[in-house]
Image (cartoon, helix red, strand yellow):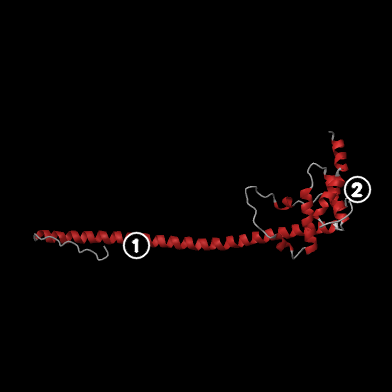
Amino acid sequence: MSAKVGYTAAMADSKGLSAKFLGLFVESGDGEASASVSEAPEVLRGPAPVLEEERGAVSASVVPANVDFDEVFKTVVDATDLDSVHKAVALLKSLPDSAPLEVRRGIVAASLKAFGFDTQKIVDAGRNQLKAIATFVRVNEQQLVKATAENTTQVAKLEAALASMKQDLARRSEHLASVVAAADLRSAEVHEVLKFFGAEADPPKTSPQS
């Protein structure tokens, strides 16, 4: 099948697709929406904002956090607009990838128009969501920077304390070694005296802690 024939077939099937996906926006309704590409508003014809281009692609090895973004958005996006973006997202996920981009845009535009959704408000709400997401990420980054600085300072203090304790143990070990050396010298002198008189040293008393 040529690209032209495939495009024509997708256009011919767009009405059926529109009717199928309108249920995402309303509980029930009558009438059929047209999905002509020419009906797509200018906001749907231009390139959609891409969050990954602003903050970098998320590593596939990172497990996404369980974030309640609706709670993040509530101060910057009206509840109605937030709901419309949710429904637009659901609609886009339901559209077949095989349909040309302009046909899919036409389906979305017709579906939104049929039930009074303002596409410009959806776009504005989407942009506000992206700003809120970027701000949310920056706040978390700033919290990490602050925590890193605080923890680094604390770690430095702990490392200094640990080094001091190690030095104290080393000094105590050296002192014990010198005490033992002095005790050995003095013991040797005493043994010589006892040996001279033919006496033996009393065995050392057992320590109560032994």
Q: Quadrant of residue 135?
A: bottom right
- Amino acid tagged 2: Ser
Element type at mark 1: helix
Q: Residue at x 82, y 45 (%)?
A: 101
Marks 2/1: CA distance?
88 Å
Within 10 angstroms of label 2, few (less than 14), some, or many (20 or more) residues? some
Expressed as whole percent of the image width and height from the top left, the position of residue 40 reads 88, 50
Q: Is residue 190 above or below residue 102?
A: below
Q: Is residue 140 above or below residue 58?
A: below
Q: Residue at x 40, y 60 (%)?
A: 167
- Amino acid tagged 1: Arg
Report whether residue 114 is seen.
yes
27 or 147: nearer the eye?
A: 27
105 or 206: nearer the eye?
A: 105
Q: Quadrant of the N terminus?
A: top right
Look at mark 1 in the image and give the residue it sits on.
172
Q: Residue at x 78, y 57 (%)?
A: 85
